[in-house]
Amino acid sequence: VLQTIYTGTNAPSSNSAGEVLFSGASANRLTGAPGGVGIWKWNSGILTQLLSTSMPIANAPGLTVSSFGGGLQQKGIEILENGTVVAHVAVVGAGVTSLNNKAVVRISNSAINILARGGDQAPGAPAGQTFVNFGSTFKFKVSPNGSVVFVGNLQGAGVTPSNMTGIWVVPND
């Protein structure tokens, strides 16, 4: 059962269809034991958990969600008009370090897919310039057609404080 609803950096988000997206913590209905933190969607009286810690990433075998929100960004979850959800998460798994543990994900049809991740080659940047997480002021927007726009920071040869931040667009699939 849903035990706590979080506000603040992960304030609820909604769309024109009346779907409401929010983060919260769950508990075992019978024992009261903590059940983890997740992202929930309310639609027409039905509450569905879309994401929780320890969920696998569909397009990155071996990686799971370790956390999201909690001051990592100013707007950490967003729901599109079609019900698809975009979120900023931290991941764990083999080879994950502090340089590649943050990602922008799309949650659609019960699958979590990474759109961009720390350590990935940044599209349009010179070879070897990769995302280095997404900074403490991570922000993203989602267009009506489902494209995701986000701010990212780079690392690599030729990256300086004056050119390390950029804006990227990931088109809707």
Image (cartoon, rainbow, N blue to C red):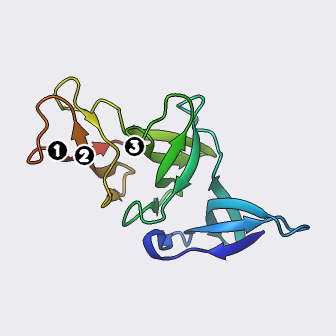
Circle nearer the N terminus (2, 3): 2
Q: Which residue is mark 1?
A: 164
> What amino acid is at disc 2?
Asn
Which quarter of the picture shows residue 36?
bottom right
Crowdedness of circle 2 by 10 Å Cα count: few (<14), some, many (20+)?
many
Residue under circle 3?
172
Q: Residue at x 29, y 29 (%)?
A: 121
- Give amino acid for label 3: Asn
Provide residue 95's location: percent of width, then percent of height: 50, 28
Q: Give the residue at x 36% y 66%.
A: 74
Q: Visible in this render: residue 121?
A: yes
Circle 3 packing at 10 Å, graded few (<14), some (14-19), many (20+), is few
Q: What quarter of the picture does the N terminus occupy? A: bottom right
- Above or below, 106 against 41 in this view is above
Task: Using the image, determine if residue 119 lies above or below residue 21.
Answer: above
* Location of residue 158 in the rendering, given as x and y in whole percent from the top left corner: 11, 31
Q: Could you say which is closer to the camera, residue 152 or residue 17?
A: 152
Query: Residue at point 56% right, 43% down?
Result: 112
Q: Nearer the viewer, residue 22 or 163?
A: 163
Q: Nearer the viewer, mark 2 or mark 3?
A: 2
Q: Residue 145: x and y, percent?
A: 37, 52
Foreground mark, 3 or 1?
Answer: 1
Q: Earlier in the sequence, mark 3 or mark 1?
A: 1
Q: Are marks 2 and 3 in contact (CB under 8 Å)?
A: no
Q: Amino acid at mark 1?
A: Met
Q: Which residue is mark 2?
A: 153
Q: How many marks?
A: 3
Nearer the observer, 151 or 83: 151
Q: Earlier in the sequence, mark 1 or mark 2?
A: 2
Label 3 and label 1: CA atoms lie apart by 25 Å
The front one of 141 and 37 is: 37
Q: Describe the element under mark 1 as helix, strand or loop.
A: loop
